[in-house]
Amino acid sequence: MDLVKSHLMYAVREEVEVLKEQIKELIEKNSQLEQENNLLKTLASPEQLAQFQAQLQTGSPPATTQPQGTTQPPAQPASQGSGPSA
């Protein structure tokens, strides 16, 4: 009986160590994603933020295209718009 208990305790300790490592990795990834999210929020225009909030409320999934649209259009029209008018 002690052998079974000892084996189970060892298995549980190993599993706890694996889970602790996974938790550590998830906390690091979460922190990285929060920083990225904050950066994207600061770079997004109020209109883009409003559009994103509307998509969240309706449950639309095109969240992967939003960050690309967030960073590219403001840079391109500004450079193209100032070039021909200057």
Image (cartoon, rainbow, N blue to C red):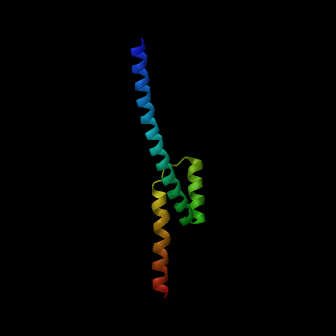
For the N terminus, the quadrant is top left
Residue 7: image x %, image y %? 39, 20
The residue at the far top in this view is 1
Q: Residue at x 40, y 25 (%)?
A: 11
Camera-side residue: 14 or 46? 14
The residue at the far front in this view is 2
Up the image or down, 12 lies above or below 79; here it is above
Residue 37: image x %, image y %? 52, 57
The residue at the far bottom in this view is 86
Camera-side residue: 40 or 7? 7
Camera-side residue: 46 or 43? 43
Residue 34: image x %, image y %? 53, 54
Up the image or down, 86 lies above or below 49; here it is below
Q: Residue at x 43, y 35 (%)?
A: 17
Up the image or down, 20 lies above or below 33; here it is above
Q: Quadrant of residue 68?
A: bottom left
